[in-house]
Structures are given as structure tokens and as C-alpha cells.
Image: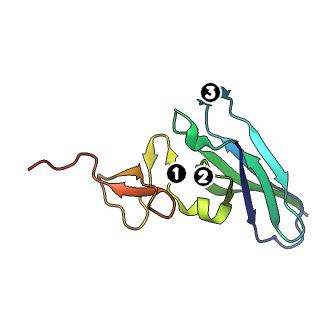
């Protein structure tokens, strides 16, 4: 089931032909193989967009979506990186919330507030985003 990612971006002055793009970082698989491709949708005059994406959280290789905003303005075409996200296996997500979650890039994860060096990200349905930081090995007395 796809995840409908929605959001609103601030419109640059005099920007036209604005699109938001999500590019899968590498080949991933669940029941089928997902080949890296750019999924895109137009951004409306209020800065809003909506796009159905494969929830790469279901994948087996730890992929990300690279998110970019592209628009035209006098002087050329501009391509602005917004960040990387992992799309969860839920019906809908807001881009601003996804950009605040840590995402794996090349096997590394940046620590958000609350994480310490040496901890790993684990699933925990009780947490707001279904994730929390934990020690990699439980301490045994």
C-alpha cells in the first residue's frame, strides 16, 4: 500500500514550474524489486503537494528518498536539496515530520536530540514516530 506524502513548501519569489522530487537511493526489495527512480509531482501556487510513494521502510537494504525542489526563475532552473527521508508503512505522512526523523545514508545514521554515540535506532510502536534510540546490546549483570 503506498504512503501519500503531503506537505507545503515556501515558494521562492517569482518561481514557476515548481516540482518536488523523491529519488530512491538504490535498488531495494520487498515482494518485488524497486529500482531507483525519480517520482515527482507539481507544487501548486500555495506551495502544497501530494504524492503516493512506496514505503521504503518495508525494504531490505536500508534505502532513503533524496528530496529535492526544482523550479524555474529568471536566470535558469534551480534544484534545491531538502534532505533525505525514509517513508514509513502508514497511509499518510507529512514531509516536514519526515525530514525531522533520522534517515540512514550509506549505512550511517545522524543522531537527533536524545540519541548518544553508540546507540542504534530501533522500532518501538509506543514512540511518536515508531522509533527510539537504544543501546545495541543489553547489559547483562
In the rendered view, tell whether residue 18 sits above or below residue 120: below
Residue at the front extreme of this rendering: 126
Q: Residue at x 88, y 66 (%)?
A: 15
- In the current view of this chain or complex, which residue is farthest to the left? 141
Is 93 on the left or on the right of 12, as rendered?
left
Q: CA distance from mark 3 to mark 1?
A: 22 Å
Horizontal and vertical percent position of residue 12: 81, 70
Where does residue 34 sit, x and y in percent of width and height?
Answer: 67, 30
Vertical order, 28 against 46 (above or below)? above
For disc 2, the marked residue is: 84
What quarter of the picture does the N terminus occupy? top right
Badge 1 element: loop
Q: Earlier in the sequence, mark 3 or mark 1?
A: 3
Q: Earlier in the sequence, mark 1 or mark 2?
A: 2
Residue at disc 3, secondary structure = loop
Q: Nearer the viewer, residue 7 or 84?
A: 7
In terms of sequence position, does the residue under pointer 3 or pointer 2 come before the other? 3
Image quadrant assignment for residue 63? top right
134 vs 64, left or right, is: left
Foreground of the two, 124 or 136: 124
Q: For the residues labelled 1 and 2, say whether their Cβ atoms are less than 8 Å apart.
A: yes
Label 3, on which residue? 31
Image quarter for residue 39? Answer: top right
Q: Quadrant of residue 13?
A: bottom right
Apparent side of residue 47 relative to residue 126 in the rendered image (left or right): right
Q: Residues within 10 Å of mark 1 (few under 14, many from 20)?
A: many
User: Is there a contact, CB below 8 Å, between mark 3 and mark 1?
Assistant: no
CA neighbours of label 2 inside 10 A, class few (<14), some (14 to 19), many (20+): many
Residue of label 1? 103
Question: Can you tell which of label 3 and label 2 is closer to the viewer?
Answer: 3
Q: Give the image location of residue 73, x and y in percent.
A: 89, 63
Amino acid at each position: 500500500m503506498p504512503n501519500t506524502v503531503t506537505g507545503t513548501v515556501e515558494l521562492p519569489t517569482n518561481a514557476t514550474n515548481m516540482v518536488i522530487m523523491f529519488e530512491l537511493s538504490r535498488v531495494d526489495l520487498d515482494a518485488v524489486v524497486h529500482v531507483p527512480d525519480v517520482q515527482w509531482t507539481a507544487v501548486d501556487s500555495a506551495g502544497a503537494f501530494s504524492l503516493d510513494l512506496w514505503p521504503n521502510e518495508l525494504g531490505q537494504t536500508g534505502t532513503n528518498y533524496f528530496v529535492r525542489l526544482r523550479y524555474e526563475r529568471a536566470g535558469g532552473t534551480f534544484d534545491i536539496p531538502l534532505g533525505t527521508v525514509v517513508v514509513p508503512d502508514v497511509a499518510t505522512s507529512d514531509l516536514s515530520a519526515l525530514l525531522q526523523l533520522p534517515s540512514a545514508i550509506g549505512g550511517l545514521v545522524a543522531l537527533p536530540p536524545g540519541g548518544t554515540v553508540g546507540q542504534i535506532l530501533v522500532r518501538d510502536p509506543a514512540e511518536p514516530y515508531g522509533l527510539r534510540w537504544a543501546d545495541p546490546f543489553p547489559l547483562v549483570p
